[in-house]
Image (spheres, grey):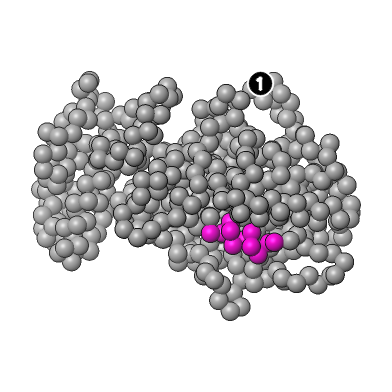
Amino acid sequence: MAGDDGLPSLGRVKITDLIPSEGLPSDSYKLSVSTLSQSFAQYSAAVIQFPAGDGALLRSGLDSACLYFQQREAYPSADMIHTNDSREWCKTSGYYADPQLWQETYDYRPGLTPIEPSNAMELPPGGLPDIFGLLGKAARGILDAMSYYLNLRSSPFTEILDNVPLRSREVSSSVLSVCCHARPSFHGAQHHNLTTQDDGQLMMFHDHDHQVDKSLISVVKSDKAGLHVRDFHGRWFLVDGDLGPQEAVVYPGLALYQATAGYVNPALHRTEINNIPGNMYGRCSLVFKLMPKSMTSLSCSEMRAAGHGVEAQFQIPVPVDDFMQRSHPTDQLFNRNTFQSFSFPTAQDGSMKPLMRRRKNNTRCKPLPPSKRLRLEAQRVLKERVQDIADKKGIKLRFCNLKECENHIHALDSPCANIRMEIGWPHGVPFVHPHDLPNKAKIGFLEAYEPGWTATHDMDLSLTEPGQASQQ
């Protein structure tokens, strides 16, 4: 849904509200996580707000970046001309240029980029170590928030992230890129595409305008508007047109898409350059990319452990280095169901009521069909009831996929038969993820583990099949 000025109503959250604490989550944390997740689901992007002091640091970094690129020569030397070489994804450092994209970049990578400049006549942009730490902490907080929303355990991606702080001789996989688009004094190839917006306005973009970051989380702060992101319906939106001085855009990347079995779609983005040549600096940006370590693998084991269905294409772990060097077609990324369907229980949580009222007033948001609401309820009961029973009895739950479990229901020597007997699993119900079960099995599952469920939940459910639910 776009605002009165035509800009999308991106979810806005304070980064301080996303800092987790011991014990039960606060109302502000749950509301911020839900706002962030819903914005990701609808627009593949959101806005985070930093405290005043951190916002001043970002603005200072952008000012320093503009001065740095302005001092660069118009024709960079041949050794500084780089294209997007995926083989060097974790080795970039210092200045390089891509004339085809009319873009210059200075990559700050701790452990590889020298802190002290080697050339006294050419000072790098200032404040990069502090900005790297600020945006890195924010990106990790956002990643943890997504983990909470997907019902994953705390910090499930720790094994694939860099150490904090880095150990001796370690090189950071994450990178802070200081970018400059369309600097008038930089003579690039300047090949562009002209695109007509819905309002008839003519926009100019690069020939290679559709880009997807291979990061887990990306955080972008620019000195001028121009970042466009495609939403779930295929429409392009300007996402940084109304940012405040303490705000930045955040969006998920391909690595998070892979690690969450496709539940979190990556942002497809492009940069507008038609309104830039009128100024002397171009468009400067600070782009932090939270990246997985090269020697690890992207696995969906955490998603399976949390009860999410994992499709065949995500079943096998993918080495990170192979993932980064592989091309990824984007035409299939927006044809899946995302984690937009998941939500927190609202009946017992008063803090979520304002969010639910906004959803009801939005004519584009249709109520969830009974089958999806049944899936949510089954997933909640799995976490709250079955896991508790297993923990108390010291049982390690093993989940099969639906096909193999259909053969295990009546077999006494099946891999999960003993677990079913120990935990008291309902007879005839496959021991699988609840959202993979047929509706009849889900209802039997809920009746067994949620006493009085059918009497206390008004969900318009039928005991037959989806699509035959009774009307309210």
- Out of 355 and 276, give the one closest to the viewer: 355
Q: In the rendered image of this protein, does residue 154 appear above or below residue 210?
A: below
Tell me if residue 131 is in the magenta stretch: yes
On the image, numbered disc 1 is attached to which residue? 199
Q: Nearer the viewer, residue 62 or 384?
A: 62
Element under disc 1: loop
Image height of 120 relative to 202, above or below: below
Decide if residue 150 is in sight here: no
Q: Position of residue 79 (x, y in %)?
A: 82, 63
Residue drawn at the location 37% of the way across and 33% of the way down: 354
Residue 57 is at least partly visible in this image: yes
Q: Residue at x 36, y 54 (%)?
A: 152
On screen, residue 322 versus residue 186, left or right, reads left
Where is residue 328 shown, x and y percent of the image?
57, 48
- Amino acid type at circle 1 is Asp
Q: Nearer the viewer, residue 294 or 48?
A: 48
Mark 1, Cα crowd under 10 Å, few <14 / some 14-19 / many 20+, is: few
Tell me residue 447's x, y (percent).
Answer: 13, 41
Q: Is residue 378 left or right of residue 337?
A: left
Which residue sits at x=58%, y=79%? Answer: 168
The image shows residue 446, relative to residue 417, as above or below, that is above
Left or right placement of residue 295 versus residue 304 in this view: right
Task: Tell me the residue at 16%/31% (across/down).
Answer: 463
Magenta span includes 291:
no
Q: Which residues are magenta?
A: 127-137
The tally of labels here is 1
Asked where in the image residue 178 lies, by quadrant, the reply is bottom right
Q: Quadrant of residue 434?
A: top left
Give the overall secondary structure of the magenta segment: helix
Residue 54 pos. (x, y %): 61, 54
Quarter of the image where the C terminus is located: top left
